[in-house]
Amino acid sequence: MTSAAADKRANAGTRVVIAMSGGVDSSVAAALLVEQGYDVIGLMLRLWSDAPASAAHGGHNKCCAPDAIIEARAIAGQLAIPFYVVDAQQIFREQVVQFFLDGYSAGTTPNPCLECNRHIRWTFLLNEALSLGAQYLATGHFARVQQLPASWQLLRGTDAAKDQSYVLSVLNQQQLAHAMFPVGAYTKAEVRELARGFGLPVHSRRDSQDLCFLPDGDYRPFLQQHAPAALKPGAITDSSGRQVGVHAGLPLYTIGQRKGLRLAGPEPQYVVAMDAAANTLRVGPRTALESTRLRAERVNWVAGTVPAAAFQAQVQIRAHGTPAAARIMPEGSDEATVEFEAAVQSATPGQAAVFYAGAEVLGGGVIAP
Amino acid sequence: MRPPVYLDHAATTPVAPEVLAAMLPYFSAQFGNPSSIHRWGQQAEHAMYAARQQLAAGLNCSPDEIFFTGGGSESDNLALRGAALAAQAAGRGRHLITTAVEHHAVLHTAQQLRDHFDFDLTLLAVDAHACVSAQQLADAIRPDTVLVSLMLANNEVGSLQPVAELAAVARAHGVLFHTDAVQAASQLELDVQALGVDLLSLGAHKFYGPKGVGALYVRRGTQMLAVQTGGSQEHGLRAGTQNVPLIAGMAAALQLVLQRRAPDNAHFGQLRDSLIAGVLQRVPESRLSGHPQQRLPNHASFVFREVDGNALLMRLDLEGVAASSGSACKTGDPRPSSVLLAMGAQPDWARGSLRLSVGRATTAADVDYAVQTVERCVAALRK
């Protein structure tokens, strides 16, 4: 017997739930699991339904539009696996959308994908999978899990350009013990190739950088609709506190933004900081965006224990950023101070700072204001 | 694992072998268009003629009162639109009466007539079993009422409506009466004279016939406006070449129902009763939905407090029990059934609905397995 056939037999009694989106990554992940002989169940989360009144067709948010359900169902049918839609609208609204709105209202740039992974995929959906008798929950993320004798490591996906370990940095040992990322060892090009081989559609409906619940990828109209109170005009000040302009509402800006500020003056000015309490936007020259130090809150240590001492690591401060060498000083159970060897640009409160040792995710937290 | 059990005969039934055999000649060998003059056409026309005779015999009406359609929903659409728009065109009135627990084929059609065609619509309040009384109907009828539509048996909760009594009220007031008999056809007597109805809808796939074919009984003399216009098929009321093989299948399926209705219903009733007794006994905080006695012989429906109906269906399917929550919805929509809410169910119960409907091939062992599985899955969900 070939080893693939032996693996297949060994996997036959293991139930795996695959979270399907209708997209190519999770579809290929499902097909790989079926090929490996697992007892596979497809689930799709119904997260949000906020179709704008203006768009009867084509204006749906991307993640759980009826079209996406139809595509995922078609793929499950092709793979001959059972497929169900699981409603998570209420918990998604409470744990992710509200967090997103609150974050913007507090003058930060929240990253809802981390919260979705923390609360929805790897808590709510994992519990759902386990209660269906599954041993694993699989997703189409580009990341890898490695089992060590007594623990699990979270690793970057093989495809550096598509790596999604940043948004999975919230996972703990218990979650990793039940996690599978079947496409994490492949490049995106290989995933497309696999899709062709499996006879699956290879087109990609959406850009994974967009937030799934935004109708057209733009969060501004969404905020206008759902948190209008957060959009109060206020002062733009320079580093000395002098008013130099007027902003239209803090959530409409991001740290490092230069365009659209409508400021006069010889030097280009960038958004440097936001003060939600005073409702002011601080601007400064490009050099003012640089920082050598940040504080991380709500830190998750993937190994489950707080490092006993300060340590060197590579720190990534945005989803598709380049990691920078830094010294990390853990504080208490879930905070840390990060000191970069060289200044980094536009560290943005609300985004995650994720700590890496090579490909391994050691942990991560949310950048404090 | 034991083979999965299909307990969703209220959603659809398998085509009976006799029905399949009756259809097969008309796909290729005798493929003619029944409107054609030549012998191929005559063969097809004859098959359709025979089918119409058989349906008329089953419904105790004349063959020219049987109109073939593309299914139960289409029959309901044709009944409501055809009768309401003809009455409106003749200036006879613009008021319709139905209930909120009708199948959407009736309810949504009535609502469209209200919203876009200037009709008034009265939705009669239903009691806790989804039933209405003759007095309620009598009180709701107005001088300009043109049509009453009340279903014979409810698809979600299985309750039987006292249609003969209700139709008599409508008749006494000179108002047309339509009944949606789609869910009832596999089990109930469909004598349109005894029922006293003017319009009655059928869909073949609910009684071991094929999908995509149905019939509408239209009492002779009833003014109808065509909804689908074109050729003069079906006396001009439903244009389009008839689907001869499916029509032959529907007639054969109804023949079969007439032949075996008594033993079928005895079989269904026994299984239904043990389903109901088993589930109510073994699942805590469970209730029967719909009428305890006046219900379809094959239909058991329940509500469970604080259980997500969709999650329950998913688990049952994985454990090999095919069921539904009352109407087919696969989108994971958690909203409680509007039928249960109209019956006055509390939302914490209405979200957890389950419909189990037995069929000819269902066995006592299937029912035992289903009861055990429902018990286990509800318990797991409440953990």
Image: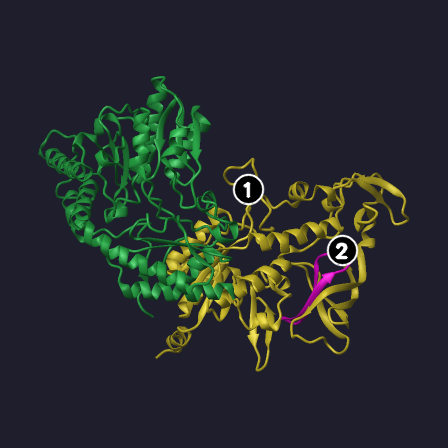
Chain colours: A yellow, B green
Quadrant placement of the N terminus of chain B: bottom left
Query: Could you tell me which residue is drawn at 51 percent across and 49 percent down?
Result: B346
Q: At 18% from the left edge and 50% from the top edge, which residue is drawn?
A: B20
**Mark 1, secondary structure of its residue:** loop
Task: Say if residue A33 shows up in the picture.
Answer: yes
Q: CA distance from mark 1 to mark 2?
A: 34 Å
Q: Secondary structure at mark 2?
A: loop
The residue located at (51%, 41%) in the rendering is: A58
Q: In this image, B268 relative to A145: left or right?
A: left
Q: Could you say which is closer to the camera, residue B344 or residue B336?
A: B344
Which residue occupies the extreme top position in the image? Answer: B91
Disc 2 marks which residue? A346
Indicate the position of residue B24 as horizontal and vertical percent values: 16, 47
Residue A209 seen in the figure = no
Considering only vertical position in the picture, is B365 above or below B345?
below
**Up-down: is A1 above or below B127?**
below
- Is A358 magenta? The answer is yes
Identify the residue shown where x is 31% and y is 58%: B273
Tell me the quarter of the picture where residue A116 sits. Answer: bottom right
User: In terms of sequence position, does the residue under pointer 1 or pointer 2 come before the other?
Assistant: 1
Q: Which mark is residue A3?
A: none
Q: Estimate the x, y position of residue A107 in percent, counting from the top left.
A: 76, 50
Q: Label 1: how many residues lie within 10 Å, few (<14), some (14-19) or many (20+)?
A: some
Q: Are marks 1 and 2 on the same chain?
A: yes
Q: Which residues are magenta?
A: A349-369
* Residue A179 placement, left or right of B32: right
Give the side of residue A175 with respect to residue A71, left or right.
right
Task: Name the chief secondary structure element in magenta.
Answer: strand
Verify whether residue A368 appears in magenta.
yes
Residue B229 position in % (x across, y down): 29, 26
